[in-house]
Amino acid sequence: MEEQSEFTNSFDDNKMRIDNLLHVDKSFDMLYRVVMIGGKKACFYFIDGFCKDEVMEKILEFLYKITPKEMPKTAHEFLKEKLPYGEIDLVKKEKDFLQRVLSGVPVLIIDGYSEFLAMDFRTYPARSVDEPEKDKVMRGSRDGFVETVVFNTALVRRRIRSTDLVMEMHTVGKSSRTDVVVSYMGSRVEKEMLDNIRKRIDSIDIDSLSMNQQSLAECLLQHKWYNPFPKFKFSERPDTTAASILEGSIAIFVDNSPSAMILPTSVFDIVEDADDYYFPPITGTYLRLSRMIINVLAVISTPIFLLLIMNPEWVPPWLEFIKINDPINVPIFMQMLILEFAIDGLKLASVNTPNMLSTPLSVVAGIILGDYTVSSGWFNSEIMLYMAFVAVANYTQVSLELGYALKFMRIMLICLTAAFNVWGFAGGLLLVVIFIVTNKTISGKSYIYPVIPFNRKQFVRRFFRVSLPRAENRE
């Protein structure tokens, strides 16, 4: 149905129109309350479960005391003179009315007023702001984002008490009408990129953001399917998000999603972790370099081992111990591929396993996959060892998207090495470099900045944790 622009002064006409729009006779949770205010008919529209009853009771108690002589002529005057509550907006158009009511904001219509009063005393069911399960730190704050966007923006506001911090509200989805908040520092953000992000969000033509931030990310950027490296950094930590905003990045919050989407993002931004800054510079540098080295080893260690097993004459004497002495019943590269999928199977099983059964699952996985598969001849113990290192290495950085991107690169290297020996390994490494180097951030810049284009100062900061600059020296 085509949305009409504005409402009329007639209470009966407006109520009939709204009742048809909201289907109040069919939806049990779509409630309305007809009252008399100053001798005029009025009606509250609200959704059950989103309304604070005690606040509504206080407001109605105040409104009931208004006499017919005290009734203002316009809704604007009524707002200024008769409503003590703070969070109130005037609603003129049908689209704005539906957005407020369906978001849980109670709206008051009064006979004789063509503008309605939206009083934001809603409340959302929400869990506590506990530390995220995946995005933990050894030292630092223990709060995390939740599924309510207002709570998430408040956690950032708590850390950035500056008038330069902007929180822009947008709405995406014809049916879902999902709240999307764009957060940035006005004096530090790149204006051209910000305008580009605004235009992309406002031009999204979709029925609903069914997958929250992932749906929004796919709408903002048409990602090439063959390049798995992530274009966005997702964080469930308010401190990480606030630090990124202060550095000039843009953070996007989507209602019903307990994380912030940070952009633009290079591969070095994704690899960074909050622990790098919660420890002294030398310790933070060690943690950062260790994480980078482990990620590189997670990609190339098993393909190099496969290459040496295929060419035993290349193994130097001091590495003779890596050779497999036991019988090999299943080809080495097949063992690696099977274990790659088995590790993902264990991950999926752990996600869907009730907590009370998590310990038995670990025991079964450890005994059956770790012992019986080796003794039965399916796998060799050396392969189990290297794949165990790969499985643990994936958890050294917080980004799941980057972890799976590295996994796909590793599988590609294994397959090419098994098929074409050393030339396959070299070609696979070249493809990995091409995938990373040719990638671009959402702003169109290099994915590996400050390596390309080279910036010496930023390059040092990406690899080494330096002391935080003073305010007057901030770039």
Image: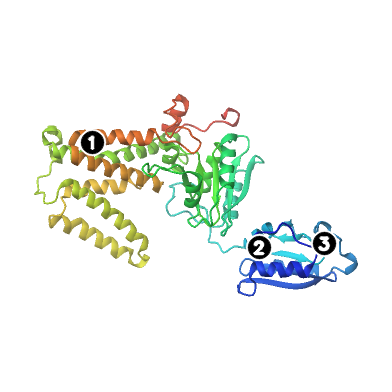
What residue occupies the far front of the structure in this picture? 2
Quarter of the image where the N terminus is located: bottom right
Q: Which residue is mark 1?
A: 425
> Where does the image place residue 382, in percent across and percent down from the top left?
17, 47
Tell me, yes or no, whether the two marked residues, 1 and 2, touch with CB atoms within 8 Å.
Answer: no
In this rendering, does residue 302 appear at all? Answer: no
What is the distance, in whole Å, between disc 1 and disc 2 at their CAs?
Answer: 59 Å
Tell me, yes or no, whether the two marked residues, 1 and 3, touch with CB atoms within 8 Å.
Answer: no
Q: As shown in the figure, which amino acid type bears the numbered disc 3?
A: Lys
Residue 200 marker: none
> Where does the image place residue 55, in percent across and percent down from the top left?
70, 66
Q: Earlier in the sequence, mark 1 or mark 2?
A: 2
**Closest to the observer, 213 or 238:** 213
Q: Where on the picture, by quarter, is residue 226?
A: top left
At 44% from the left edge and 47% from the top edge, which residue is drawn? 137
Q: Which residue is mark 2?
A: 101
Q: Is residue 405 above or below residue 85?
A: above
Q: As shown in the figure, which amino acid type bears the numbered disc 1?
A: Phe
What is the distance, in whole Å, between disc 1 and disc 3 at their CAs?
Answer: 76 Å
Q: Earlier in the sequence, mark 1 or mark 3?
A: 3
Q: Viewed as shown, does residue 251 lie left or right of 89?
A: left
Q: Viewed as shown, does residue 473 lie left or right of 319?
A: right
Element class at badge 1: helix
Element class at badge 3: helix
Q: Earlier in the sequence, mark 2 or mark 3?
A: 3
Q: Which residue is mark 3?
A: 82
**Closest to the observer, 51 or 415:** 415
Q: Where on the picture, by quarter, is residue 76?
A: bottom right
Viewer-nearest of labels 1 and 3? 1
